[in-house]
Image: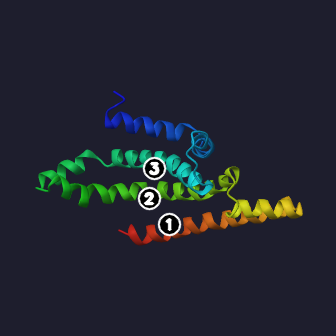
């Protein structure tokens, strides 16, 4: 049923993954504002991206956990390991190796989604500053091309850092 913890989790993941993050940010900023709960544009952006991103992360971890063979659990238990030891020493290391690159993709996605902050009045992020310069100078292509290059560089830096971490963590 829907009121069980699994049902609530499945419902939340379904809503988070199957509605646009733009709408989630709108609901948090404008929808809560119409109910008398005014939140800052930064908080609405952060909460919207977090809500949406967490739905995808939950699915990444669920898939990663399903990818670890049950024979690993049975083998660890047959060696006398407790459930906690099995998860700590057998399941979680394999799980992290499986989900590491999808987590990196989600991190890049979250950084790129900060550009949506301009729709709720956030003007002190990269897209907001770019929009301000565009309004003052009408040099749309130049400024947004520079912003795109900066977003690209940020994304590549995240990916390069993740590759370095993966090389360090998963060398065996």
Q: Quadrant of residue 99?
A: bottom left
Q: Going from the N terminus, do you reach mark 1 or mark 3 first?
A: 3
Of all residues, the one furthest to the top in this rendering is 1
Tell me how far mark 1 sits from mark 2, CA to CA.
Answer: 8 Å
User: Horizontally, is 162 left or right of 172 in the view?
Assistant: right
User: Horizontally, is 73 left or right of 104 in the view?
Assistant: left
Residue 5, image x, y percentages: 32, 37
Q: In the rendered view of the protein, which quadrant contains the N terminus?
A: top left
Label 2 element class? helix
What residue sits 37% from the left and 58% below the top? 96
Label 3 element class? helix
Tell me how far mark 3 sits from mark 2, CA to CA.
Answer: 11 Å
User: Horizontally, is 142 left or right of 120 in the view?
Assistant: right
Q: Which mark is residue 100?
A: 2
**Residues at badges 3 and 2 in contact (C-beta under 8 Å)?**
no
What residue sits 81% from the left and 64% below the top? 133
What residue sits 61% from the left and 39% below the top? 34
25, above or below 90, in the image: above
Residue matched to label 3: 57
**Towards the viewer: 118 or 104:** 118
The answer to whether any part of residue 141 appears in the image is no
Tell me how far mark 1 sits from mark 3, CA to CA.
Answer: 16 Å
Q: Going from the N terminus, do you reach mark 1 or mark 2 first?
A: 2
Frontmost of labels 3 and 2 is 3
Label 1 element class? helix
Residue 148, image x, y percentages: 73, 61
Q: Quadrant of residue 98?
A: bottom left
**Towards the viewer: 76 or 143:** 143
Q: Residues within 10 Å of mark 3 (few under 14, many from 20)?
A: some
Q: Going from the N terminus, do you reach mark 3 or mark 2 first?
A: 3
Residue matched to label 1: 162
């Amino acid at each position: 049923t829907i009121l069980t913890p699994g049902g609530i989790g499945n419902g939340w993941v379904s809503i988070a993954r199957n509605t646009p993050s733009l709408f989630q940010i709108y609901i948090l900023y404008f929808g809560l504002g119409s109910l008398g709960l005014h939140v800052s544009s930064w908080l609405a952006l952060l909460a919207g991206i977090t809500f949406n991103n967490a739905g995808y992360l939950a699915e990444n971890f669920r898939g990663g956990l399903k990818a670890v063979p049950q024979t690993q659990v049975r083998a660890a238990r047959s060696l006398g390991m407790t459930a906690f030891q099995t998860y700590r020493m057998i399941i979680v290391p394999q799980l992290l190796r499986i989900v590491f690159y999808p987590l990196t993709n989600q991190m890049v996605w979250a950084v790129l989604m900060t550009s949506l902050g301009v729709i709720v009045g956030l003007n002190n992020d990269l897209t907001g500053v770019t929009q301000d310069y565009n309004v003052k100078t009408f040099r749309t292509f130049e400024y947004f091309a520079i912003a795109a290059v900066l977003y690209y560089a940020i994304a590549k830096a995240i990916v390069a850092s993740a590759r370095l971490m993966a090389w360090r963590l998963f060398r065996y």
